[in-house]
Image: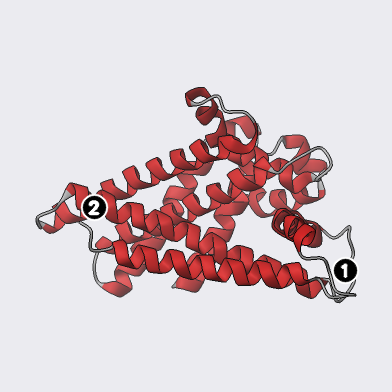
Amino acid sequence: MNFLFFFIECYVAVLLFRLIMTQQELTFNSIGKIIARLTNPIFAIKGKSKADTDPLIPLFIALLTLAFGLLISVTGGSLFYIIIAFQKMLKFLATFFIISVFLGAMASPTTGAFPLYFYRLGNIFVKPARKILPLKGNLIVIPAVIIVMVLFIAINSALVLLSVILDGANFNIVGIIWKNFLLFLTCIVDIMGYMSGAVIIRALLSWVSPDPRNMIVQFIFYVTEPILAPLRKVIPPIGMLDLSAFVAIFGLMIAQQFLRQLIASMQGFL
């Protein structure tokens, strides 16, 4: 079931990219063409413009999550698995938008198409953050991530509360909110793991002279360069060996393990 949900997550990511792309990009852009090929069978409705079908995307994501929840509830023997499915989707969306906020903050006219798309996705939360706190530069990512966190905790707490009420059990609302805050921190742990994987791929690519025009190669370089570039200033390469990647992987693993232990130690606070 986890494998199936992974494919659902991938398709939801594709849908979110479709949401922020223009019709022209879906028609002529190389990335847009791939997105269109995967989504047009559902959302290219005759007589309807992209602006007409875009509002259907969140509804489709909800229905897709519901269908997955119903499937696992049949095998698991409980309708509570539907709520679990929505919680899994919510965690994925929180992680996805945190990544989008950070990657979008690094976008510039010279970084290519991928950063532009992440910039648009991140703007879903950056724009309201600027209205609340008009911070300059990339500091705006902090309130933007806080908005993601607040929404995650609020919606997930509501789902947990619903399941507890349906079960007829007692509940502690403060405890529910606290546990969902800790669950949000696990999104950061996951992101550190993804970053470690990206740096490892970057290190491996450095040995095979990849095509710099390849979209995947460009994306890996774009994601990892903000981590590796500052390290190279402190740790220069030794011949052909770039030690910055090893230091980055080691640092991310330590930070990831520290945050895991911190979350575990905070479980019993409330």
**Mark drawn on residue 210:** 1
Closest to the observer: 83 or 142? 142
Q: Residue at x 70, y 48 (%)?
A: 36
Q: Which amino acid is tagged 1?
A: Pro
Few, some or many C-alpha atoms within 10 Å of disc 1 (few <14, some 14-19, many ≥20)? few
- The quadrant holding residue 141 is top right
- The quadrant holding residue 220 is bottom right
In the image, residue 79 sits, relative to residue 48, either above or below, namely below
Closest to the observer: 82 or 168? 168
Q: Is residue 174 visible to us here?
A: yes
Name the residue tied to disc 2. 176
Q: Position of residue 5 (x, y in %)?
A: 48, 66
Q: Would you say 95 lies left or right of 172 here?
A: right
Q: Which amino acid is tagged 2?
A: Ile
Q: Residue at x 58, y 31 (%)?
A: 52
Q: Is residue 42 visible to us here?
A: no
Q: Residue at x 55, y 53 (%)?
A: 12
Q: Helix, strand, or loop for circle 2?
A: helix
Q: Position of residue 198 (x, y in %)?
A: 68, 66
Q: Which image quadrant: the C terminus?
A: bottom left
